[in-house]
Every structure is written in C-alpha cells, then in structure tokens.
Amino acid sequence: RTPVRLARGAIDGTAEATDQLLRTPGVAVVVDGYNVSMSAWPRLDARTQRDHLVKLLGAASARTGADVHVVFDGDSATEAERRPSVSAPLAVRVHYSAADVEADDVVIAMARDLPTDRPVVVVSSDRRVAEGARRHGANVVSSSALLAWVRA
C-alpha cells in the first residue's frame, strides 16, 4: 500500500488535509477509539465516550463517504456495556479487542490486513500506533486533527 499523497499546498495535520484524506475514494478509516474519545470527552465515563464517538464518526462517514472502523479495548466492558446506545450507522463498524490484546495492536493489524489496493487512514495520537500504521502504508491523522476537522 502507498499512502495517499496530499494535494499541493495541503499541510499534514490541518483540517484541509484531514478532509482530503477522509474524502479519498474507497478509503477505510481505522480509529483508535479511546485515544480519540479520551481527548474529546475526558470527564465522561467510557460508555458515554464510546457512544459520543460512534455518533461523531457516523456523521463524519455521512459527510465523506468513508468506511469507518473504530476499535476499543475489550477488557474494560461487558458485552452489554459494549453495545453503543446510539444506532451505529452501517458505515461505522465497532470492534473490540480480545481481553488480552490492546486495541492499539488491533488498529495496527487492520492497517496491515485491509486490502493493499485500498487507501487506509488511521486516526490516533499514539506514537506506536502511528508508526505501526505508517509501516503498512497508511496515512495517519491525529486525534486532535480529526476533532478539529469535525468541529470546523
């Protein structure tokens, strides 16, 4: 996989670059769930964070046409607690890591395992996740850049 090249003049980390990446035809967006939700809503409980993030990602998917996957750590919630209370749009797929696997590793594996002819954007501010995603040819958008784009 080759990372998506930004249009001339677009600066990585800006709302313009984020918009371009998320509107790339056929893009799969893989989101490090708690990395984004804890930056956006640090005072809320985990379930409420998940619900807010899934709703936000649904709106982002509707706005861009992106196929969105969000990955959360699976060890902190029971099966009933994991289900989003919001109706997740079909374009948002919610994944949980196994109890003994970090969501970070699932995000990196998804960047590796999605078809190589498909552009992949990973959303995370975690350095290990970002480096792992880049090794597999994915573009990386920071949590703060995604949140700034959504609010723009």
Image: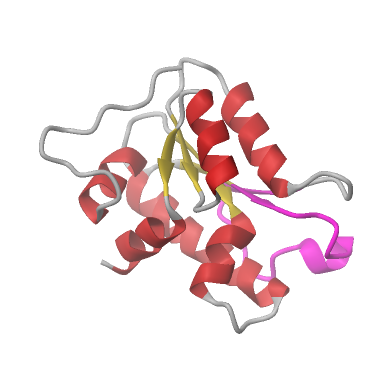
Report if residue 91 is visible in the image. no
- Compared with 135, 86 (above or below) is below
Residue range in magenta is 70-96
Q: Residue at x 63, y 61 (%)?
A: 34
Q: Is residue 59 magenta?
A: no
Q: Residue at x 71, y 73 (%)?
A: 47
Q: Residue at x 46, y 15 (%)?
A: 117
Quarter containing the C terminus? bottom left
Quarter of the view holding residue 101: top right
Horizontal relation, residue 128 to residue 106: left or right:
left
Residue at the farthest left position:
9
Q: Is residue 83 magenta?
A: yes
Q: Residue at x 17, y 41 (%)?
A: 10
What kind of colouring is applied to the model shown? secondary structure
Q: Position of residue 3 (x, y in %)?
A: 37, 25
Viewer-proximal residue among 85 and 33: 33
Q: Position of residue 88 (x, y in %)?
A: 60, 58
Q: Position of residue 44 (x, y in %)?
A: 63, 82
Quarter of the view holding residue 121: top left
Q: Position of residue 80 (x, y in %)?
A: 86, 66
